[in-house]
Amino acid sequence: MMFLNDLVTVDKAVDTAIYLQIANAIIQAIRRGRLRSGSKLPGSRELATALGVHRKTTVAAYEELLAQGWLEMIPRKGTFVVQDLPEIKPKKLKQTETSVAYPEKTIFSIDEKRFVQFPALGFPDTKKLIINDGFPDMRLIPNELFLRELRSMGKQPAFKKYNMYGRAEGTDYLRDTLSSFLRETRGLPISAANVMITRGAQMGIYMAASLLLKPGDQVIVGEPSYFAATLTFQQTGASINRVPVDEGGLAIDAVERLCLTKKIRLLYVIPHHHHPTTVTLTPERRIRLLELAATYKFAIIEDDYDYDFHYTSNPILPMASLDHHGSVIYIGTLSKTLVPAIRIGFIVAPENFIKAVANLRMGIDRQGDSMMEVAIAELYRNGTIGRHIRKVVNLYRERRDHFCSLLTENLGQRVTFRIPDGGMSVWTRFNDSDLRNVSAKAFQKGLIMSDGQRYNTGTINYNSARLGFASLNLAEQERAIDIIARCL
Amino acid sequence: MMFLNDLVTVDKAVDTAIYLQIANAIIQAIRRGRLRSGSKLPGSRELATALGVHRKTTVAAYEELLAQGWLEMIPRKGTFVVQDLPEIKPKKLKQTETSVAYPEKTIFSIDEKRFVQFPALGFPDTKKLIINDGFPDMRLIPNELFLRELRSMGKQPAFKKYNMYGRAEGTDYLRDTLSSFLRETRGLPISAANVMITRGAQMGIYMAASLLLKPGDQVIVGEPSYFAATLTFQQTGASINRVPVDEGGLAIDAVERLCLTKKIRLLYVIPHHHHPTTVTLTPERRIRLLELAATYKFAIIEDDYDYDFHYTSNPILPMASLDHHGSVIYIGTLSKTLVPAIRIGFIVAPENFIKAVANLRMGIDRQGDSMMEVAIAELYRNGTIGRHIRKVVNLYRERRDHFCSLLTENLGQRVTFRIPDGGMSVWTRFNDSDLRNVSAKAFQKGLIMSDGQRYNTGTINYNSARLGFASLNLAEQERAIDIIARCL
């Protein structure tokens, strides 16, 4: 019987039960039009003999197919493919492409070849030295403390409820904890109702943009500014307006001029350490910006993703702590403080905004990981996070100073930079070498570093890169700068 | 000095360092226009005396304010608020509302009062009995095994790399594991490149809808259908077309008629156990639907969220296993299998679609929780998940049978239902009592159950509810049905 050998092959080596392999093969044969509607099948005994399996197995396969409605049994006649199946024209398999076209929303295009621009993303296993864009040192993260907390929590019956669906805003336990913490350390006059837990700063930006922007809306960002935020705004169809960034941060005069000519909907700012240039927005500009927002009724997204990492004074209080008009949507993250792969961040905003964001979130992924959120809250409450921050801030300050000395001593007039007050990178301009060449040469010598292209917006070639100092110990920094010196 | 007592209050009971409290109070006073640009501040000694704190504390406060740029020191003159601050008109605080208007995207409106419709969502701590919408029994979830896996993984250096940023598609380790598993158990002819890890089925639906739909596009769903998916499609601005659902699932003739009159972009179907009615799409209709999709070039979202829970035969192979045209975007989740609060699901689709979804994901929340994903992969590989599924399926089958017997014996002609082949709920129509009254009365007697309104689309009042049997043991089922009987 040609059918048997041709259509059904049994592979005893794979995990799938043999009767299921037989059933699936028969379904595929029907689907491909090779076993037609109404065809008679061999008896289970005959099939068993042909396939070299036990008769019980073929009986089970047929029972499965009867239960699933593919076969029917006609008494004293035998087993048949059901009668009413449509005619199939057998077609070629094309597994790599959809027949359905869709707009390629490739604004966030992940170009594997260009991962070198974001060294931290693409080479987790590399043996090469990496100067990344400003990420924490993975060797210092308190991952074990986090997992221990999670495990011990998992044993307590009181935490069992966090396994069930919870609120889109995040668990009340973490919202309470964070709101106290932010009230005490960042001067934010808030309660838990003003806090929404997100999956990192990016989700905060995404949700705020989704809620605030529609095609044609006008957004202000810096020139230069954090590219991922700009892309997120562009994806909504909004128009981007760029204002200069100088040593005092965003140029507020330019913001005001824009307000006079256009209806501005949203302004995005990183006042603490501007991305990519790391400058801090001056107090005078902070106040003027808040007044402009109140006058012209635009929203401000204050992205404070690296609040904890400030070296010259205590971290500077957020603009949100000075906002009396509900203009500021304040976005933070714990990814830099804890583990980048543990995606927990937050939005602080007026209560009505938080409710609207929560409604939006229901449709995106419903909620965060409650157990993780509660474990993070515990780490805040028992002081683990505070101790960890103090420890790494001291270490990163030392690394910043060492790195900047190395830049001065080894690269001298070839680069221009200022010592950043905070953050994890030094915004470094290469004065007389094309950074793309430097990056390519460095790669040959075993150092992965940015080629700077990501910071360019098309109007200005900065020929600069954020050189991340925090993830390299002093010896690694010396090796890295030595390689760069040999590439200029 | 009025300034001191009026503007700065020190609270030694709170956690914030006192020098920071003083600094923050002075910043707030400047921000509110009560301390003007250029005002002279008292000396640190004078301030210390007035506030009853050590002079070192006030010196630290002034240093902080100097560092942050709020104050300036003029030699031999004293300490002043910086000169160039803009004039502030003091305003009233309004912390509950933004001054910025935004479209309330309240399609997913979370109405606290109506949580009773989704009993599982709102009452994690209730002592009342709950018949939910069809959720697993939280008492049976293998949360401890998961946490133990996570903890032991966290100790192994090889897993350290999963703390750093990873791929938007998910960790290769889980994608490999899942693709083998789905190939072997669900007949899907795929590799890891066809798998994207998501945060539950909802995120899969959200991302597929975002990619495929634009305002005005035509979508087909069942009447009735899973409301959250419908809302997600509506949020993109697409138009919803409803086709009847009968005992054999979606009426394919009605789908074909729609294809003749409109350009259909997307069809959403839950072929395994339709939501909310739990019926299974017949083999004949599956094949016809795939042929229609190929002919009229629309995409199919196959939502197979409760694949594992089938009681009359093995789970029925997904339509995706029969798709030769790349029309099917197959969506699954582990939330029902493991822990609802651990948001891990997947999309299986042609490789180009997966790449486009990954680009989209970069802008939403960047990536999933890599450590969680790897722990889940381990639980697949060591057989924990398979064993857990076999165990609970047997138990849920017993619960389904018991629950259906109770419905027949205690409610008799007052309700109509069919025994579901799978899933975790019985679609039950109340023949002669308004379900809203039944639900309200039951609440008074200590039972939380759906009032059925969520399943109504506006055209038909089903007066029916999904009565979840899986989360109640046999004794709880008896109590619950007894209460319902007394409410009819």
Image: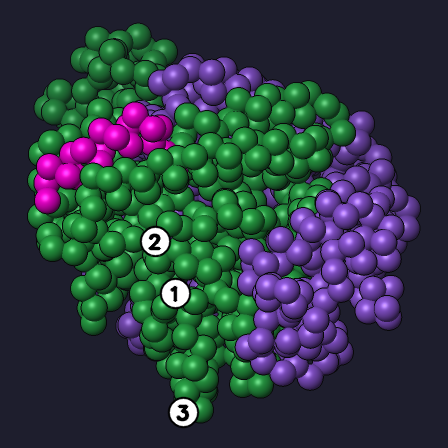
Chain colours: A green, B purple
User: What number is the disc on residue A418?
Assistant: 2
Pick the front one: B400 or A472: A472
Q: Tell me whether the residue at label 1 lies in contact with that at label 3, contact meaning CB atoms closer than 8 angstroms.
A: no
- Name the mark nearer the viewer: 1 or 3: 1
Q: Residue at x 25, y 54 (%)?
A: A416
Q: Position of residue B348 (x, y in %)?
A: 32, 42
Three-letter code for the amino acid on which mark 1 is drawn: Glu
Of helix, strand and loop, which mostly describes the magenta segment?
Answer: helix
Give the chain of mark 1: A
In depth, the one of A336 and A421 nearer the eye is A421
| Secondary element at image label 3 | helix
- Dot 2: element: loop
For the N terminus of chain B, the image quarter is: bottom right
If you read the primary sequence from the N terminus, does the residue marked by circle 1 or circle 3 appear first?
1
Q: Are marks 3 and 2 on the same chain?
A: yes
Residue labelled with disc 3: A261
Q: Residue at x 22, y 36 (%)?
A: A481
**Residue linked to disc 1:** A247
> Dot 2 falls on which chain?
A
The quarter of the picture where residue A463 lies is bottom left
Query: Would you say B152 lies left or right of B123 here?
Result: left
Task: Report in which chain the residue with disc 3 lies.
Answer: A
Magenta residues, start to end: A470-488
Calculate the distance from the C-alpha at mark 1 to the C-alpha at mark 2. 10 Å
Left or right: B361, with B484 as reference point = left
**Sequence-wise first label, 1 or 2:** 1
Disc 3 to disc 2: CB gap under 8 Å: no
Q: Amino acid at mark 3?
A: Thr
Give x and y (percent) for residue A49: 22, 10
